[in-house]
Amino acid sequence: MSPGGLAGRAGTSALCAVAAVALLAGLGAGIARGERSQYGNVIASLRGGFSPIKLPRREPAPVRVHLEGSLETADGQTLPRVTEIELGLPVQGIINTRGLPTCPLSRLRDTTPKQALQVCEGALVGSGKIEAEVLLPDQTPFRVDADLLAFNGRLGGQRAVFLHAFALKQLTVIVLPFVISHANGRFGTRLSAVLSRELGPWPHFARFDMTFARQFSYRGKSHSYLSAACPIPPRVTTGYFSFARSTYTLEDGSKIETGITRSCHA
């Protein structure tokens, strides 16, 4: 049976994990202390950082971003189903896709990581790992560990990040699109993904570990997928800012959110 034929089984769970990462944003030279938030029995954690941490005050410079996130229950019970994931990025950060190749969503479906890279390597912007819990009727829940690739794409005219998750043990493959949008406030860039019931066994996200970094050339010049500045006042050498925020919407409509603050040097 092909990997795609099994996507509806364990793939949904992997998908949720994929979503959690999301995608995209925030990294670090040194991964600093993480933050934890609790809603009822559910605990969400997030940590990460970016490198280099020394950046120009005004002109954005290339950065590499790393994020680690997880969901767990305080009493060890089964993880709740996640229906939507949103990742917020700071206004100081820039996602630059001009001149970067895009990968059509259709090319990633039913592919192994090797096949996905063969058709879309030019659009690759990140990689990582995910873990999720799969619940099937009349069966004991089981964990899925999957490799994760992130590709630059477009969905409905909007910029997006396509997260490709593949679990070799369960022969599971799933592709989840995160749509990139802009908003007011500290987190000016947001990536969001909806996890519908059509995914099959509903996603029960556990944890992810993701790195985003990509350098590319466009019109004879070097560009970076992620860039940032450290806009602090003159004579000040270190500043702090809201670095990343993850928000999970659970099946009952409740939300659990956690964010992290990091420092930069100018």
Image (spheres, rainbow, N blue to C red):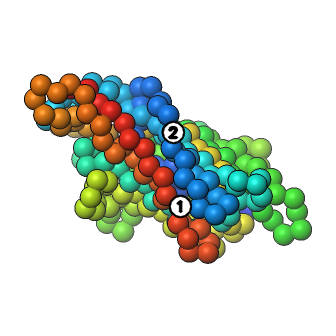
Q: Residues within 10 Å of mark 2 (few under 14, many from 20)?
A: some
**Can you say whether 56 is above or below 187 in the image?**
above
Quarter of the image for the N terminus: give it. Answer: bottom right
Out of 230 and 158, give the one closest to the viewer.
Answer: 230
Position in image of residue 169 (x %, y %):
77, 44
Where residue 212 appears, as percent x and y from the top left, is: 43, 38
Residue at point 59%, 68% (across, down):
250
Residue for badge 2: 34
Question: Where is mark 1, residue-wise?
Answer: 256
> Under tag 2, what secondary structure?
loop
Estimate the x, y position of residue 206 in percent, counting from the top left.
66, 50
Who's the residue at 64% across and 58% down the image? 42
Residue shown at 31% from the left, 54% from the top: 187
Instruction: Give whichever of 218, 266 is nearer the camera.
Output: 266
Quarter of the rendering occupied by the C terminus: top left
Q: Residues within 10 Å of mark 1 (few under 14, many from 20)?
A: some
- Could you tell whether 75 is left or right of 124 in the image? right
Q: CA distance from mark 1 to mark 2?
A: 16 Å
Which numbered dot is residue 6? none
Three-letter amino acid code at the position of disc 2: Gly
Give residue 81's quadrant in the image.
Answer: bottom right
> Residue, x 25% and y 61% (percent of image)?
184
The disc, 1 or 2, on the residue closer to the chain's N-terminal end is 2
Is residue 211 in sight in this rendering? no
Depth order, front residue of 247/20: 247
Q: Position of residue 105 (x, y in %)?
A: 47, 58
**Extreme residue in the left direction:** 234
Q: Tell me the amino acid under the disc marked 1.
A: Ile
Q: Is residue 263 visible?
A: yes
Q: Is residue 109 above or below residue 244?
A: below
